[in-house]
Structure formats: C-alpha cells, structure tokens
Image (spheres, rainbow, N blue to C red):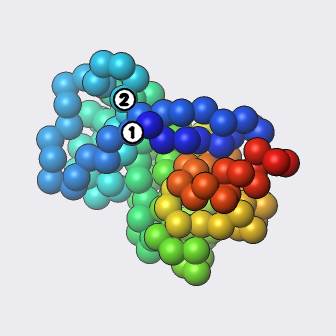
C-alpha cells in the first residue's frame, strides 16, 4: 500500500506500475488496485487506458513532454508526475504546463524523491496530491 497525502489528510492506495511493454488488463484488478501506465505506453493505446476509468493513471517521467497528453486530459482523472531526485526540478515544469497551459483540472500527483520543503512549491505549480515514501515527510505533515 502507498500512503497518499491530499486535502490535508492521509489515505492508502494500492498501485501497480505497468511496464512500457506490458499488456493492459481487460479490466481493473479486483480489490481497488490501480495502474500506473508510462506516458509512452498510454500514447500507444489511449482509448484502452481511458476505458479502465479510475483504475489507471498516466505516469509522466522527468523530461517527458506532457503536452502530448493534451487531447486526452479531459478524460484522465489523474496524472502522476515523477520527481526522480529532490534536486531535479523537471516535475515542477510538467505540473505547471498541465495546469496553466493545458488547463488540466484533474489530480496531479507527485511521486518519487521529494522533500518536505518542496511541497508548498509543488502545490503552487498545481500538484494536488503526494505519494509519501519518506517517514520524515509523513511525520512533518502529520504534525502540521
């Protein structure tokens, strides 16, 4: 299970990262497991992923062109933006492009290696939820 922080509260979700060459399932897995599908895999068959509904999200790696998602954004409830290192700022750019240039209104989730001090900046860029993997980040968020 993955800890998610959104709207001032913590929840837990089960996510499966689908590899770029893996076949999409015919339907979402039982038990609320959700799919993270890499951008390239999504773009190869967007209609099939969209048909999975809330059971799937597009994972945008650092440096990938989020503008390729523009024709599909109205049908995507969530886009995951990867922060591979806390020193890598490309995720901030991806989030801003999604919100400000493309007008995306769904959930933008930050995943990866980020630190507590970056969360307010991420929120200013349009990130609305966070995958929490560092215990110190969780503890600080819980403390307010």
Give left or right: position of 8 versus 41.
Answer: right
Can residue 143 be seen here? The reply is yes
Give the residue at x 75% y 68%. 117
In this view, the residue farthest toward the bottom is: 87
Which residue is more in the foreground, 136 or 36? 136
**SS state under label 2:** loop
Residue placed under numbered mark 1 in the picture: 15
Q: Which mark is residue 33?
A: 2
User: Do callouts 2 and 1 mark residues in contact (Cβ within 8 Å)?
Assistant: yes
Give left or right: position of 127 versus 2.
Answer: right
83 is higher (above) or lower (below) than 137: below
Give left or right: position of 55 versus 18.
Answer: right
Give left or right: position of 104 versus 57.
Answer: right
Snapshot quadrant of residue 24? top left
16 is higher (above) or lower (below) than 33: below
Q: CA distance from mark 2 to mark 1?
A: 6 Å
Which residue is more in the foreground, 40 or 123? 123
Task: Measuring from the top left, give residue 136's x and y in whole percent.
Answer: 66, 59
Snapshot quadrant of residue 62? bottom left
Q: Which mark is residue 85?
A: none
């Amino acid at each position: 299970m993955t800890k998610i922080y959104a709207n001032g509260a913590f929840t837990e979700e089960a996510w499966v990262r689908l590899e770029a060459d893996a076949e999409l399932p015919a339907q979402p897995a039982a038990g609320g497991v959700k799919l993270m599908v890499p951008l390239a895999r999504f773009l190869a068959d967007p209609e099939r992923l969209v048909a999975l509904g809330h059971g799937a999200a597009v994972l945008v790696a650092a440096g990938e062109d989020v503008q390729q998602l523009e024709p599909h954004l109205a049908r995507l409830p969530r886009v995951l933006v990867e922060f591979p290192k806390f020193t890598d700022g490309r995720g901030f750019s991806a989030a801003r492009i999604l919100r400000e240039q493309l007008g995306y209104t769904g959930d933008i989730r930050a995943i990866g290696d980020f630190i507590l001090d970056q969360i307010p900046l991420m929120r200013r860029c349009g990130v609305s939820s966070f995958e929490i993997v560092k215990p110190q980040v969780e503890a600080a968020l819980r403390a307010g």
